[in-house]
């Protein structure tokens, strides 16, 4: 499997960024961070960068092996289940114990199948942020077909065009009234398909991009300018949809990550956080609800400072919880399979 260690940094930063966004959206009283608030709110789009990285990483590990038949489907899917299910099932159990109801039991059961991405509305109340896993696992289920779609670069570009059209149709027709009475949006894999396809395309061009990134300079500056342009230029309004600027911004950052190791993206601390980034993402709202019980707002009168302290507590608790539970579950799984 090819190793592109800079992606570790993006996984870690994306998980923390999404946690900061969710904390801002749920904390009370609401902080007044002026120009910083739109940036933190924008962190919700990091799920799309996760989609690109997930597609690229899975291709690195399994594209050739699926294509040549050198890995069995039983091995492929077993590994996917063991990687995701134990921690997610444990979190779901905690959630239904906190607020038990018949509905939470139903939703926890669906969580444990990891197939809830097939539901027409996969927005679960039990571990609500877990919708991301529903979409990702559906991508895993379809991965052999995805390999077929990515069989050649020409076909991959054609598929990208098709998925972009599908995304626009979802926004303009299929996910609007009167066709539907709810909007699944990015929870639906067809809506998010362009990001998975971009990950596949980056994989197909990975060697050229790696060599190119090690020869050219200034790419990080370009990425920063693209991000700044997203906020200060009406790009989304001009193009009619946020899909295109997000594809451009996140593709640029991913290309940057394909170069030689960057210390700020690949070091011991970042690699540690990256290894538990999925767990941090899944448990951060549970940790936030626990921090809420401390009622820090009674002791910290400044709303902005309260947000900062709450965020630090939540993320630190999420890191500790993720590491301890993941390590314990990993030992249990290894012992059971031995």
Image: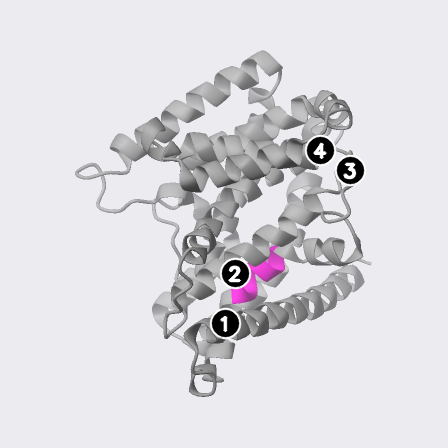
- Cα–Cα span, label 1 and label 4: 34 Å
Which residue is nearer to you in this view: 104 or 46?
46
Question: Magenta span has 283?
Answer: yes
| Residue found at x 72% / y 29% | 217
x then y, percent, for residue 14: 58, 51
Are circles 3 and 1 on residues that touch, CB within 8 Å?
no
The answer to whether 286 is drawn above or below residue 56 in the figure is below
Disc 2 element: helix
Q: Earlier in the sequence, mark 3 or mark 2?
A: 3
Which residue is identified by label 1?
288
- Which span is picked out in magenta? 278-284
Which residue is identified by label 3?
3
Which residue is identified by label 4?
258
x then y, percent, for residue 36: 45, 57
Question: Magenta span has 168?
Answer: no
Q: Earlier in the sequence, mark 4 or mark 3?
A: 3
Are circles 1 and 2 on residues that touch, CB within 8 Å?
yes
- Cα–Cα span, label 3 and label 2: 27 Å
Which residue is nearer to you in this view: 109 or 298?
298
| Residue found at x 61% / y 39% | 53
- Does residue 127 appear in this view? no
Q: Quadrant of residue 154?
A: top right
Q: Earlier in the sequence, mark 1 or mark 4?
A: 4
Q: Earlier in the sequence, mark 3 or mark 1?
A: 3
x then y, percent, for residue 201: 60, 24
Image quarter of the C terminus:
bottom right
Q: Earlier in the sequence, mark 1 or mark 2?
A: 2
Which residue is identified by label 2?
19
Image quarter of the N terminus:
top right
């Amino acid at each position: 499997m090819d190793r592109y260690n800079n992606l570790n940094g993006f996984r870690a930063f994306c998980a923390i960024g999404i946690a900061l966004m969710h904390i801002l959206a749920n904390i009370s009283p609401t902080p007044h961070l002026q120009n910083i608030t739109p940036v933190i709110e924008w962190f919700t789009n990091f799920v799309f960068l996760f989609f690109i990285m997930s597609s690229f990483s899975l291709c690195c590990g399994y594209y050739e092996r699926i294509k040549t038949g050198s890995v069995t489907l039983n091995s492929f899917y077993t590994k996917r289940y063991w990687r995701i299910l134990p921690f997610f099932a444990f979190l779901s159990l905690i959630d239904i114990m906190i607020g038990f109801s018949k509905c939470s039991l139903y939703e926890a059961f669906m969580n444990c199948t990891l197939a809830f991405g097939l539901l027409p509305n996969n927005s679960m109340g039990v571990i609500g942020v877990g919708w991301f896993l529903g979409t990702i696992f559906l991508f895993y289920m379809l991965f052999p077909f995805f390999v077929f779609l990515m069989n050649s670069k020409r076909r991959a570009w054609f598929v990208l065009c098709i998925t972009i059209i599908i995304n626009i149709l979802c926004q303009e027709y299929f996910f609007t009234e009167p066709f539907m009475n709810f909007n699944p949006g990015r929870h639906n894999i067809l809506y998010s398909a362009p990001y998975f396809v971009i990950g596949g395309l980056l994989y197909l061009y990975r060697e050229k991009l790696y060599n190119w990134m090690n020869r050219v300079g200034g790419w990080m500056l370009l990425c920063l300018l693209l991000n700044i342009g997203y906020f200060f230029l009406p790009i989304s309004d001009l193009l009619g949809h946020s899909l295109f600027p997000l594809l451009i911004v996140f593709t640029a950052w991913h290309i940057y990550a394909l170069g030689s190791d960057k210390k700020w993206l690949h070091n011991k601390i970042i690699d540690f956080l990256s290894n538990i980034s999925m767990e941090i993402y899944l448990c951060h709202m549970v940790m936030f609800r626990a921090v809420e019980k401390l009622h820090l707002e009674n002791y910290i009168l400044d709303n902005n400072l309260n947000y900062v302290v709450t965020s630090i507590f939540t993320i630190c608790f999420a890191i500790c919880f993720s590491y301890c539970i993941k390590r314990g579950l990993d030992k249990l799984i290894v012992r059971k399979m031995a």
